[in-house]
Amino acid sequence: MDLKTLTQTIDNVIRGVGNALSWLGLVLVLIVCTSVFLRYVWGVSNLGFDELQWHIYSLCWLAGLSYATVEGTHVRNDILYNRFSRIWRLRIDFWGHLLLVVPFVAVALYHAWDFVSWAWKQNEGSIDPGGLPARWIIKSALLLGLGLFAAAAISRSIALAVDIRNLKKARP
């Protein structure tokens, strides 16, 4: 498998996960509306609904990191960046991924592992009455999200290196 096929495969998996999880946005809206209706119309508050909202939002946010990286829609300061030549923009992106994103994800994954494994060992649940019983599930999503983000950063770094190499070859 060549590098282009590898990066496209990784990117397609991340896009698929992102597209599938994007439907959770609709679920989130329905849960929020139900929670508001119950609270303000019937005077019933349900902490489980509130925690479920946080969990769904967290899952979407974590998956969104990798999706935005693959699509190139992440936040960046474009004031100076857009004035650079294509080769310099590729170099900035490449070194930014290699020196900032990949080490950040590696450190985050390293620390998240203990955080998640402790939650599994303790069968951690909400400390609040009426909260969700299995908090370790959403904590496990941290590993999934960071793993996807690491794959996206590595895939993007490889694609940028290939683009830089091809641009250098194309120069006379």
Image: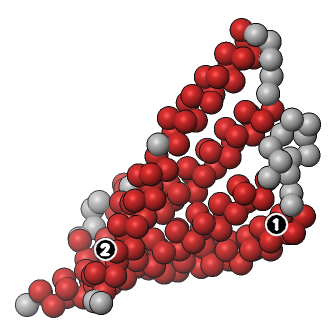
Residue toward you, 33 or 134: 134
Query: Total marks drawn?
Result: 2
Mark 1: few/some/many CA within 10 Å (<14, 14-19, 20+): some
Expressed as whole percent of the image width and height from the top left, the position of residue 56 reads 62, 45
Expressed as whole percent of the image width and height from the top left, the position of residue 169 reads 15, 91
User: What residue is at 34 percent from the left and 74 percent from the top?
Assistant: 9
What's the CA distance linking mark 2 and mark 1? 34 Å
User: What residue is at 81 percent from the left and 32 percent from the top?
Assistant: 47
Residue toward you, 125 or 2: 125
Residue toward you, 163 or 122: 122
Residue at which label 1 appears: 120
Tell me if I can see residue 76 in this picture: no
Most distant residue in the top direction:
41
In the drawing, does residue 90 fall left or right of residue 97?
Answer: left
Marks 2, 1: nearer the viewer: 1
User: What residue is at 41 percent from the left and 52 percent from the top?
Assistant: 19
Q: Earlier in the sequence, mark 2 or mark 1?
A: 2
